[in-house]
Image: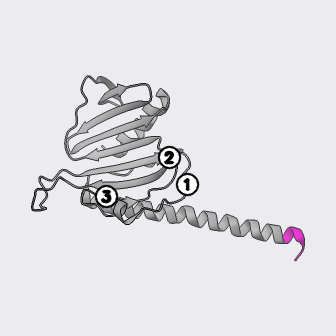
Amino acid sequence: MNKFGYIFFIAAIIFLISGCQKDGSNDEIAKAQAQVSALASSFSIPTLDGYEVSYIQHKFPPKDKEGNFIGDNQEVLVTYTKNKGKLEMLTKEQKASNEREIIYGPFQGETLIEITYTNTQVDLNDADIIDVSGNQVQKIKNSDYTFLVFNASKGSITLKFNSLDEDTILSTAQQVFNENK
């Protein structure tokens, strides 16, 4: 095999491997969605244009002294990054928790968007009310973060944006709300 044929062969192998890794990642997200659906049937993990899921966790309801759940509050947290890095290795203490279960990740990368679904209603104090795709949404903005809360009949979705522009925030919120009506 000549030099160029060998380089082409290696490039093709690398391309195939990277493609398989993306598919594997999608399979893992699909498995995570199945798990989330069992916990919170009315929440769908949104696919956000230009962002990758880096972490998914389920937070358990609080427990009493005997270890029994108090209430049925279910909370799912999903984080997104622009460039998902390597899977972070967690210690046994970090993995084992009576308060949460890690469903996917965590992967390295700067968290730009956090989405929290809970099966209860959430209200932000002193929030402005804006309209996103015909939905009444609570909004609070500080110097670094913008928070949006959308309450629906089966719960609420809280979005936290890390230093993103207004157009990106509104288009992302529209995607999330459209996928979770």
Badge 3 local density, few (<14 within 10 Å), some, or many (20+)? many
Q: At 38% across and 51% down in the image, what residue appears?
A: 45
* Secondary structure beneath label 2: strand
| Badge 2 amino acid | Thr
Residue 85, compared with residue 95, is above or below; it is above
- Which one is nearer the viewer's eye here, 68 or 42? 68
Q: In the rendered image, which residue does mark 2 sit on?
A: 81
| Amino acid type, callout 3 | Val
Left or right side of 111 for 73: left
Label tally: 3
Instruction: Find the distance from the CA under tag 2 to the CA under tag 3.
Output: 20 Å
* Residue 36's disc number: 3
Range of residues picked out in magenta: 1-5
Asked whether, in this view, residue 27 is left or right of residue 58, the answer is right
Q: Is residue 134 above or below residue 85?
A: above
Residue visible at 25% across and 58% down?
39
Q: Which mark is residue 47?
A: none
- x then y, percent, for residue 52: 50, 50
Q: Position of residue 122 (x, y in %)?
A: 22, 37
Q: Is residue 134 magenta?
A: no
The residue indicated by pointer 1 is: 85
The picture places residue 80, in percent across and down from the top left corner, at: 46, 47
The answer to whether mark 2 and mark 1 are in CB contact below 8 A is: yes
Magenta residue check for 3: yes
